[in-house]
Each structure stands twice: as structure tokens, then as C-alpha cells.
Image: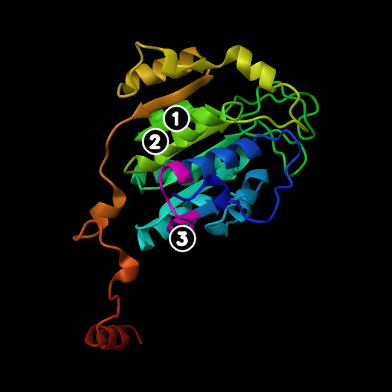
Amino acid sequence: MVEAKEFIQSVKPNWCPGCGGFSVLNALTRSFSELDLEPHNIAAITGIGCSGRISGYLYSYGFHAIHGRALPVAQGVKLANNNLTVVAVGGDGDGLGIGLNHLMHAMRRNVDITYVIIDNHIYGLTKGQTSPTSPTGTVSKTTPGGSVEEVVPPLQLALSAGVGFLAQGYSGDPKQLARLIQAGIKYKGFSLIVALSTCVTYNKVNTMKWYRERLYNLEKDQGYSPDDRLKAINVVAEKNELVTGIVYQKEKQRYGKLLTRSGDAVPVHQDLTADKQLLDKLMTEFV
């Protein structure tokens, strides 16, 4: 088994001390180790933002995409080589702002990748602007009079869009977060894990103390079953999205299996050489 520390690059994270990103990075490396994965079998795809640095801190294949575009790249990597464990990581601005359209279609397609959204309710890298998950009334550089917009609710959004696996963790509980990431990676299809996180520099409201006083752990609710989508929707709405644990899980047909007759065949290992006669015919038709 590869130890968790062996998934860490020599490049040291330059997040602010106390940033939730450290916890998410720890949860990822712990998950890879406990799932008995190896660096050369992992691809970490990230977008722009504080969370985007994770692909450079992990010792694995990595790609730093442009803002909001981690999911198209991650899906392409998985469809080209489905032997890889593909994990995409983004922030609330990256994944629920400019990249929201890609999230909706990724859930619809159900490509077998895991997407971790680090949600700290603020734009951190660009120095503290209101994000899609910032509470109404948030005072920031872009909303000095307080935000008048309603919050984008990621859990309710995912459930309504038909996601197959949905979980939410918290950076203050890295052990639970690691369990959720492991469950998401094991799930055969698109899995979404929201990691509630603190931004100690720009978000002085949603602190560790704030979360600990409000979070509801579904794992301790003996009457809760994550296979009931309607119940999941009701609980998430009732608790104002402040839940942790596996929110919903149900098997769905995977996109990769629908595309190929051979099911789990690996495209990068197949002979994709074009037929010369077909090429000549196309050239004659279009040139």
C-alpha cells in the first residue's frame, strides 16, 4: 500500500494558515492510500481558484484547467482511459458559478469521475468577492451594501438534476471527509462531494465554530436512508443544506458503457487507426 504522504509533491501548499484546503488535500491523500491506489493510476483535474492548486500539490497525473472547465477535461480523461481514477476539484465559484453548466451535464451523463467542490462561500484567490453560495446579505468587495441574490443550493440542485451519488463533508472533520471521498471514488458513475470549508482570510462568518454549532451528521441519524431521493430532498431543505454524510446514492447506467459495445474497453489501448478507404472516400466527398 502506498502511504498517504507519498501522494504529496515536494511543492509546499501556500494556502493561508487555517485554510480548509489543507484538510481536503489530507482527505484526498488518505483516500488514495486506503483505497490502495497508486500515483500513476490517478488523474487530478482542477479549475482556477485556491482549490485549483491541489493538482500541483498531489503526486499523480494532474491538469490545471481554466476557470470553470475542470469537468469537461476530467470527463475527457476518463473516457480516453477509464483505467484511471479521475478526481476533479474546484471551488464554489469555479463549480457553481462559471462552471455550473458543466456540472449539470456531468451529472446527466454520469461519467465515472469524482468531483469535490470546496465550498467556502466566498471567492478567495481573487480576494474576497461574493460567490454563488455566499449568504444573502453578504458584505464583500462586490456587494458593499450586502448581497441581494439568493444562494445557489448545491445539494438541492444536484438532487433535482438526478445525480447518482451525493455527499457533503466538512473540512473540520477530515476523517469523515476521507470516508465520503472513498465512497465517491468507489461509486460507479459521477459522484459529487461538497466539502464545506473555512476561508479564514475573507469569510469571517462561516467559521469552524459556526459550522460546529449547526451541522447535522446524517451518519448519526438511524432513520435516514440515502437511497430515498425524496427524503434526501426534504432533509436537505429542512436543514438548510447544513448536513454531512452520504446524502443520496443510487446506481445509474454509466456513460462510458453506453458509448462502446465492449463496455469497459480502454480507448487508449485500442487501435484507432482510421480505415484508408474510408478516409479516401471522405476526402473525395468534402475536398
Task: Evaluate if marks 3 and 2 touch, with contact meaning CB atoms under 8 Å apart.
Answer: no
Answer whether residue 42 is magenta in the image: yes
Separation of marks 3 and 2 at Cα, in angstroms: 21 Å
Of labels 3 and 1, earlier in sequence is 3
Pointer 1 residue: 167
Task: Evaluate if marks 2 and 1 touch, with contact meaning CB atoms under 8 Å apart.
Answer: yes
Magenta extent:
32-43
Report x, y in % for residue 278.
Answer: 24, 83
Residue placed at 36% from the left, 58% from the top?
79
Pointer 3 residue: 40
Q: Is residue 241 visible?
A: no
- Quarter containing the C terminus: bottom left
Pointer 2 residue: 183
Separation of marks 2 and 1 at Cα, in angstroms: 9 Å
Crowd around label 3: few <14 · some 14–19 · many ≥20 (10 Å):
few
Of labels 2 and 1, earlier in sequence is 1
Q: Quadrant of residue 208?
A: top right
The amino acid sitting under disc 3 is His
